[in-house]
Image (cartoon, coloured by chain):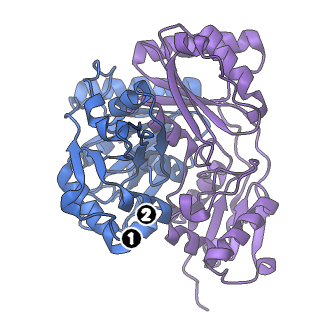
Chain colours: A blue, B purple
Amino acid sequence: MTIAKPGQLLLVPNTLDLGTDCEVPLDAVLPRAVIARAASLGHWVCENAKTTRALLKRVHQLVPLAQPLQQIQITELPRPAKGGGKPAAPPDLRPLLAPALAGHDVGLLSEAGLPAVADPGAALVQAAHALGLVVVPLSGPTSLLLALAASGLNGQIFAFVGYLPVEPIARAARIRTLEALSRREGQTQIAIETPYRNDALLAALVQHLQPTTQLAVASGLTLPDARCETRTVAAWRQAKVAELGGRLPAVFSWLAS
Amino acid sequence: MTIAKPGQLLLVPNTLDLGTDCEVPLDAVLPRAVIARAASLGHWVCENAKTTRALLKRVHQLVPLAQPLQQIQITELPRPAKGGGKPAAPPDLRPLLAPALAGHDVGLLSEAGLPAVADPGAALVQAAHALGLVVVPLSGPTSLLLALAASGLNGQIFAFVGYLPVEPIARAARIRTLEALSRREGQTQIAIETPYRNDALLAALVQHLQPTTQLAVASGLTLPDARCETRTVAAWRQAKVAELGGRLPAVFSWLAS
């Protein structure tokens, strides 16, 4: 009896175009070797099997899949609770990694960007470490850092705070707390929102942040109609057209002076 | 007289292999369209002209440069102060963007990963916004988020804290402060260090963090000898071989429970 060398858990980045009406060429956002690696895999764990199959079809147009799509094993992660705070004790995800223990590399894919960052998947990575598997993160688009880089705000110290409260009074309080933290630490604050609430969040930030605070909005990153704008809150208040629409993913960053 | 349409400021990601004895294939970490865009540019702003020329030679092997290397304009950024805290008032970098005002796209390149994140360049991005130029961040490797994704720690809430103090007493105090913050907020803390001090930082983290805190170390990301390990501090204390060596860039992340 031979014991197979364990497979690796590959963290495969996804495009940032899900849910938009644009399909970005894979070659614009994913390295060729990452596309080839994705084409070679027979086992995936993902947020959504349907969108995973859609991505694999796009992969196949550039690098033929090593096996027919119907034969590729695609398993969905359990649905996580959304929002911030300490994550609950993760469920036992080790069974999802059985193919790796049997010697097959397993790809982890999220709906956008790098898995396990502002996205589910971290619990699977923890399970992989617990099993002693090698975890390999692959290069690709990451909306948070693309937005931060394009903001011109402090990239030496920053915090990603996830989603802000939806309820207006709690949201205003949270915005002020984070602004005070930004001022005290010189720390850029980064938040995201569900696209259909983008304009409500932008309006709240423009209303509650101080006029001298710099506010950056990046929407539709990597898409042809991407916008990256950085202004003081005072200038945002004077900007006539500040609507994002409810269609494109957006990242909001601010730095108090 | 015609007025040229302004060029864009392109944030071009670099490989993560500078200073290592390994040269990663560009196709492993950069999308083909990003390589082609880099090959097309006649104007660059960078940290270091020599390493920029070295990257352009690697680009040329995949996509021929649009003009001879000797004719490409490469301008170095003023040297920034290292470390955290609020950045000083930025110098006037608008002259570096004169080519963009004259209609040429300008590439911004750092020594590793995405420019303006844990790296200089943010002041140039600010200047671009002040001039009304379009800023376009391009997809590529970002060691901080690759490390975070591979850690399995909380990717929904995290902070990048830059460099910790070198002086041992101040460093121990900072580690304890950040651990308390991590426990209170459920926030993953991410720090970096100059490679030759990696082992000293790892030793300090293992010494001063609580035994139940999870500590992740990612070194040599995207390189063949990349290592991504996540353990409790108690397990790190028992690990016999925990030396990183002073050669590879590393990212340290921890999450207190």
Residue B217 visible in the shown view: yes
Within 10 Å of the Cα at label 1, are there few (<14), some (14-19), or many (20+) other Cα atoms?
A: some
Does B166 sit left or right of A61 as displayed?
right
Is the residue A188 above or below the residue B6 in the image? above
Does A99 sit left or right of B46 as displayed?
left
Reading the image, the residue beneath label 2 is A36
Name the chain under label 1: A
Image quarter (top left, top right, bottom left or bottom right) of the C terminus of chain B: top left
Which residue is at a point 78% across and 32% down the rendered structure image?
B196
Q: Secondary structure at mark 1?
A: loop
Does B31 sit left or right of A119 as displayed?
right
Residue most toward the bottom? B1
Q: Secondary structure at mark 2?
A: helix
Residue A23 visible in the shown view: no
**Residue A121 lies in what quarter of the image?**
top left
Toward the viewer: A231 or B125? B125
Reading the image, the residue beneath label 1 is A63
Toward the viewer: B81 or A60? A60
Which residue is at a point 71% across and 62% down the rendered structure image?
B45
Name the chain under label 2: A
Tag 1: amino acid: Val
**Residue A95: where, in percent of width, then height?**
26, 31
Callout 2–callout 1 Cβ contact below 8 Å: yes
Is the residue A97 above or below the residue B67 in the image? above
Tag 2: amino acid: Ala
**Residue B29 lies in what quarter of the image?**
bottom right
- Work out whether mark 2 precedes mark 1 in sequence or the reverse, and give the earlier one: 2
Which residue is at a point 76% across and 27% down the rendered structure image?
B197
Within 10 Å of the Cα at label 2, are there few (<14), some (14-19), or many (20+) other Cα atoms?
A: some
Which label number is shown at residue B190?
A: none
Q: Distance from label 2 to label 1 (Cα)?
A: 6 Å
